[in-house]
Image: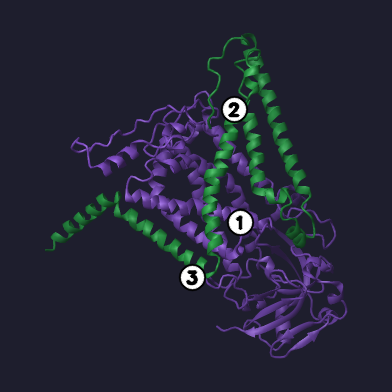
Amino acid sequence: MSDDMPSRIRRAYRWTAARYGADPLHLLALLACFALAGYAATRVVAAGIWAGFAVWFVGAAVVHDLLLYPLYAVADVAAQRRPWRRRRRPSGDPGRPPPINYLRVPAALSGLLFLIWFPLILGLADDTYHRSTGLDTSPYLGRWLLVTGVLFAGSALAYAIRLRRHRVVAGPRLHVRAPRSPRSSPSG
Amino acid sequence: MSDRPSRGDAHHDREPTSGADRTTGRPGPPGRQAAAWLRDHPPPGPFRPEFWRSPLRGPWLTSVFGLVLLAGIPILAITGLLSYAAYDPRVPDNDTTPERGLLGFYLFDWPTYPASLYRVTQGVHVVLGLTLTAVLLAKLWSVIPRLFIWPPARSVAQAVERASLLLLVGGAVFEFVTGILNIQLFYVFPFSFYPAHLYGAWIFLAAFAVHVALKLPKMVRSLRSRSIRRELRTGLDATRPEPPDPDGLAPLSPAEPTMSRRGALAFVGGASLITFGLSVGQTIDGPLRRTALLAPHGRDYGTGPNDFQVNKAASAMGVHLADTGPGWRLELAGARPALLSRADLLAMPLHTYVLPIACVEGWSTEQSWTGVRLADLARLAGITPGTAYALVESLQRGGAFGQASLGAGQVADPRSLLALRVNGADLSLDHGFPARIIVPNAPGVHNTKWVRRISFRPTAR
C-alpha cells in the first residue's frame, strides 16, 4: 500500500493536468489569486462602493484596450499614410531618411503628458484646485503647449541635422535609389 | 509604434482541423464539428494573427518592459502600503477604511523617525507611478495581440488565467488612473479615493503576483534570447523581427520596421524621463521646484517666509480673520482642561525644528517651524506624554480632514509642535494661523491647521 500512494497521487495529478490543461500548481496559484482578490472585493462591497468601483475597474481595461489603444494605433497609421507623401515623392529624394519618427516621438510624448495631466491642462478641477492651493490652473495649458512646442522644435531640428548629414554623405548619389526600399509599411 | 490591419483576404492557416476528429480522421458529432469550425475560423480583423504586424513586438521586448515593471511595481506597492500605515488608521477617528478586515494585518504605529521618511516614500510612490505610466502603456501595447487570440481559450487553464488578466490589466489601469486623477484633485470617480485605491491595489497585487509566478521563467528565457548589448548597437537597417513564438507576440507577417528596438526602448525611456523630469520638482525645495512644469504643486508662491505650498486655502475652508483674531482660544481637553490664548502659548517654552510637510499627493516641502511642544501641552492638560493620543480639531468648516488624531508616540516626540511661527514669521492664515500642528514624518493632512481644540485621551492599549 505504501508504495501505491505516490503512484495514485501521480495518476490523480496527471488526470487533473490533462483535464485542466496545465500543471495543477497553475490552478493552485490562480485560486490563491482569486481568493485574495475576492476577499478584497468583499471589502469593496463592505465599503458600499462596489457599483462605481466595478464600473471603473472593468472600464479601465476596456477604455485602454478598446479605445485608447485603437485611437493611437490608428493615428500612427494615419501619420504614416500621410496624404502629402504621394504628392512629394516624384520630385523628392526617395532615399532621404523617413521623417515618421521625428513626428511620432514628439507627438507621443506630448500625448502622454496630456493623457496624464489633462485635468490640470484643461482646468477640469479648477474649483478643487483653487480651494486647495489658493491658485488657479490657468498656467498649465500654456506650459503643456510650451513643452509640446519644444518637443516638436527639437525634433524638427534633429531631423534637419539628419537630413543635412544624409545629403553630405549621399551627396553625389542623391538621385540614386537607396539600397533599402522606402518604408511604406507602418509598424512599431 | 502600431499596426496596420493586413489585407482582408489574408488567409489564416494555423492548425487546420476542419471539423474532423483529429484522432480518427472521421467527422465528429455536429456540436464538436461546429466548435472545431469556429476554432479554425477566427472573426476577421484583430482576431487573425496576420492583423498584428509590428516587427518589434515579441517576447524579448515584452520581457524588457516586464522586467522594468517587475522592479517598479513592488516599490509602488510597498510605498503605497506604507502610506496607508502612515495614516495611522488604528488611532481613533483616523480610519478612512474601517471595513479593511484582514488587509490591515501589517499596520503598525507610524514612527516619527526619520522625519523625512514619508516625504521620501510618498514622493517615490507618486513620482515613480507617473514615471512608470509610459512603461505600463508600452507593456500593454506589446501584448495587445493576446487580447484577441482565437479561440479565446484552448483549455480550462487558459480560461482561468485570462480571467486573472482582467484583474491584472483592469487593476493596473485602475490604480494608475485613480492615483493620477487624485493628485490633480479631479475627483470624478464615484467613490472615495482611499478605499478604492487601497482595495484596488490588493486586487491588482493578487493578479500581479500570480502573473509574475507564471511568467517569470518565460521572461528570463526571453531576456536571454537576445543580447541587450547587441540590441543597443543595432540600428534600423539591421532590425529584424523576433522569431515567431507560441504566444503569438512576434508577428506572423511583419511589416518593414520603422524604428529599431533600441529606438523603441529609448522612446519609452524618454517618455518616462520627461514625465519624471516635469514632476519630480514638486518634491524639492528651492529653485528646482520650478522644473515641475506639469505637477499640481510645482507652483512658486514667492520668497517670503510663508510663501510655500498651500494645501487647503483658508478662504475655501470657511476660516476667517474673525475666528482667528484676539478672541481665539486653544481648548485643551484632558485630565485638567485649559483655555489658552495665542499670547499664553507664546509665553510657553518655544522650540524650533526644520520639518517637512509631505502630502499623500506626492509633493513635499521643508520649513523651519517654531511652536509649543505637544508634549508640554499634554502635561498642561494633566496627561503624561506617551499615554494618550490626541484628537486635534480645526476651525475649518467642511472639507476633508477637519480633524485628525495623533498617536501617543507622535504626541510624545519632542519635535512635534503646535506651531505658531514659520521661518521666523507668524503663520499666515493659509498656513494655519493662529496655530497648527506639525509632526515629524506625519502625512500632511494630519498636520491640522487652524487648531481650536486638542483632546488628549488615554490610549486603549
Per the image, the residue denoted by label 3 is B105
Q: Tell me the residue at 38%/36% (across/down).
A: B245
Q: Chain of mark 3?
A: B
A115 left or right of B26 in image: right
- Nearer to us of marks 1 and 2 is 2
- Nearer to us of marks 2 and 3 is 2
The purple-tinted chain is B
Q: Position of residue B5 (x, y in %)?
A: 49, 31
Dot 3: what SS? loop
- Callouts 2 and 3 close, C-beta under 8 Å: no
Measured Cα–Cα span from mark 3 to mark 1: 23 Å
Q: Tell me the residue at 78%/73% (across/down).
A: B450
Per the image, the residue denoted by label 1 is B179
Dot 2: what SS? helix
Residue that lies at the very extreme toward the left in this rendered image:
A1
Per the image, the residue denoted by label 2 is A80
Chain A painted colour: green
| Image position of B437 with respect to A5: above or below | below
